Image (cartoon, coloured by chain):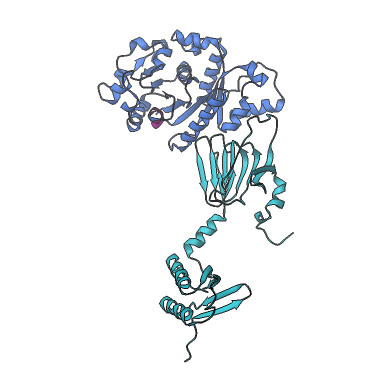
Chain colours: A cyan, B blue
């Protein structure tokens, strides 16, 4: 029976791609990568670093294995691994990603001294009182008064937004941007139905709720209909 | 089996002790058997406000440490027959002399003999607060119409909501100056209740008579003509389950709607 190749090198107009078989054992794969790259006389004379993409199909690679492959390829050639593409992720990671994009409803008043931390988007049905803090890795939507501190995109998502029925926060934070309330707040302003996002000038802007559909079209997850 | 109500505020000087003394006295006037418990160990005041300072023989720490029986430490208030007793705090120890578990046991014992145990809580959120709350079934949060007092009340409500055996707390707004509230120089009652989002059980107007009375060791409730006295009596009636409308501030009402809202605010 003819032995099929476990490693196939393909050149596309975007650069080189290494297709690695996902059926054979990892050790076989490693050996073949090593052999292929040593024996091949391709690009022998080129000194310049070339970036390659690695596609591993349905094989699950641990972080160590990924590092090992990257090192292997780097050693053999003047190649540098740009990206390892795989079709599979671990269940743990899948659950984590799921949580991060989930909307978590909470019906509570967040009072002074209390901190509410959420992975994903927070939908707070209640108020945030002065001295209270809400923090989410995603967006924050407050159905009541926001008078305390809100920190959206706390793990570093600058696209995150904060929206509140009444926006009178003591501080707003998005990713690592911080904005505080002006010292003189006009008493009679209603500040209702407002949102906050990071503007083009890398500062937190507060505006009418309706501008979000233009600034953050990705907020809409609903498809079809209309 | 009685019930234990803790009077707390977080911030100091908003009138916890005055409120405890007057609610307790008002309940006794209504014919209930009441025991006041001062948990402010090291800074006791309740005995002074009640005018019972001279009669203290044993105190809370003596009971906890087994140097006397509960009934030996209780100071009877002769003005109310057999209805009002005070368990004074110790003045020589500090808050760490008592543990929450011991307080719970003590309050449970008192509940066998009295209809209401009113626990006067010290300011702050440390050991003293934890002791005071340990045995309580209900809580009254006292605040004044000042931002700082409301902020601390908010904090304390957050802590009380975490206590499993304490029902959701009720609010007393103390020291209201109606002319300042009318001019908008003081926080408005509606503003405070929506901010804290708990039930209002009473409002008390600022009254010079209160200070005079407590200096004489006589709770203001005993003077039926004072506005503050009526307010405390009303709070006591609400604790007993009566529905009493809120005392109106002597200002023109802002509108029918807010009046109705206020009325229904008190269940």
| Residue A192 spot, x, y in % from top left | 69, 38
Q: Quadrant of the N terminus of chain B?
A: top left
Picture quadrant of residue A143: top right
- The residue located at (49%, 74%) in the rendering is A77
| Residue B208 spot, x, y in % from top left | 54, 10
- The residue located at (60%, 32%) in the rendering is B194
Of residues A193 and B177, the one drawn nearer to the viewer in this rendering: A193
Picture quadrant of residue B234: top right
| Residue B62 spot, x, y in % from top left | 28, 21
Evaluate whether residue A28 shows in this view.
Answer: yes
Does the magenta-highlighted stretch encompass residue A12? no
- Residue interval drawn in magenta: B128-135
Eyeballing the image, is B226 above or below B24? above
Q: Quadrant of the C terminus of chain B?
A: top right
Classify residue B54 as left or right of residue A30: left
| Residue B263 spot, x, y in % from top left | 63, 26
Eyeballing the image, is A75 above or below B262? below
Does the magenta-highlighted stretch encompass residue B132? yes
Q: Please identify the residue farthest to the left as the structure is shown.
A: B67
Eyeballing the image, is A6 above or below A53? below
Evaluate whether residue A23 shows in this view.
Answer: no
The dominant secondary structure in magenta is: helix
Callout count: 0
Q: Please identify the residue farthest to the bottom as the structure is shown.
A: A1
Of residues A187 and B89, the one drawn nearer to the viewer in this rendering: A187
Q: Please identify the residue farthest to the right as the structure is shown.
A: A226
């Amino acid at each position: 029976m003819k032995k099929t190749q476990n490693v196939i090198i393909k050149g596309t107009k975007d650069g080189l791609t290494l297709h690695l078989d996902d059926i054979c054992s990892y050790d076989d794969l490693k050996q073949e990568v090593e052999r292929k790259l040593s024996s091949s006389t391709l690009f022998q004379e080129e000194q310049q670093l070339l970036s390659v993409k690695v596609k591993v199909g349905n094989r699950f690679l641990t972080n160590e294995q990924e590092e090992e492959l990257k090192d292997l390829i780097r050693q053999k050639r003047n190649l540098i691994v740009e990206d390892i593409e795989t079709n599979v992720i671990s269940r743990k990671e899948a659950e984590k990603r799921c949580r991060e994009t989930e909307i978590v409803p909470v019906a509570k008043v967040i009072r002074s001294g209390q901190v509410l931390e959420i992975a994903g988007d927070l939908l707070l049905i209640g108020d945030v009182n002065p001295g209270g803090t809400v923090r989410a890795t995603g967006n924050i939507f407050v159905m009541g008064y926001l008078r305390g501190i809100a920190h959206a995109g706390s793990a570093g998502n600058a696209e995150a937004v904060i929206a509140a029925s009444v926006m009178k926060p003591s501080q707003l934070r998005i990713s690592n941007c911080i904005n505080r309330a002006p010292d003189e707040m006009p008493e009679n302003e209603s500040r209702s139905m407002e949102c906050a996002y990071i503007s083009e000038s890398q500062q937190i802007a507060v505006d009418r709720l309706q501008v979000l559909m233009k600034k953050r079209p990705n907020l809409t997850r609903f498809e079809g209909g209309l | 089996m009685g019930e234990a109500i803790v009077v707390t505020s977080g911030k100091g000087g908003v009138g916890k002790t005055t409120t405890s003394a007057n609610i307790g006295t008002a309940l006794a006037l209504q014919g209930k058997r009441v025991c006041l418990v001062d948990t402010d160990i090291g800074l006791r005041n309740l005995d002074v406000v009640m005018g019972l300072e001279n009669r203290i023989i044993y105190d809370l720490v003596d009971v906890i440490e087994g140097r006397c029986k509960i009934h030996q430490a209780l100071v009877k208030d002769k003005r109310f027959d057999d209805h009002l007793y005070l368990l004074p705090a110790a003045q020589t120890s500090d808050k760490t002399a008592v543990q929450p578990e011991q307080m719970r046991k003590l309050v449970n014992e008192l509940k066998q003999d009295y209809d209401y145990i009113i626990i006067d809580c010290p300011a702050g959120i440390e050991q003293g607060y934890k002791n005071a709350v340990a045995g309580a079934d209900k809580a009254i949060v006292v605040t004044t119409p000042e931002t700082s007092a409301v902020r601390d009340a908010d904090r304390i409500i957050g802590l009380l909501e975490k206590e499993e055996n304490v029902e959701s707390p009720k609010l007393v707004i103390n020291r209201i100056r109606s002319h300042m509230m009318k001019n908008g120089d003081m926080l408005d009652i509606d503003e405070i209740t929506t901010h804290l989002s708990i039930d209002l059980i009473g409002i008390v107007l600022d009254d010079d008579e209160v200070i005079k009375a407590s200096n004489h060791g006589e709770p203001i409730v005993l003077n039926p003509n004072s506005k503050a006295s009526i307010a405390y009596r009303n709070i006591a009636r609400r604790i007993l389950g009566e529905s009493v409308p809120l005392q109106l501030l002597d200002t023109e009402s802002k509108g029918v709607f807010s009046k109705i809202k206020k009325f229904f605010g008190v269940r």
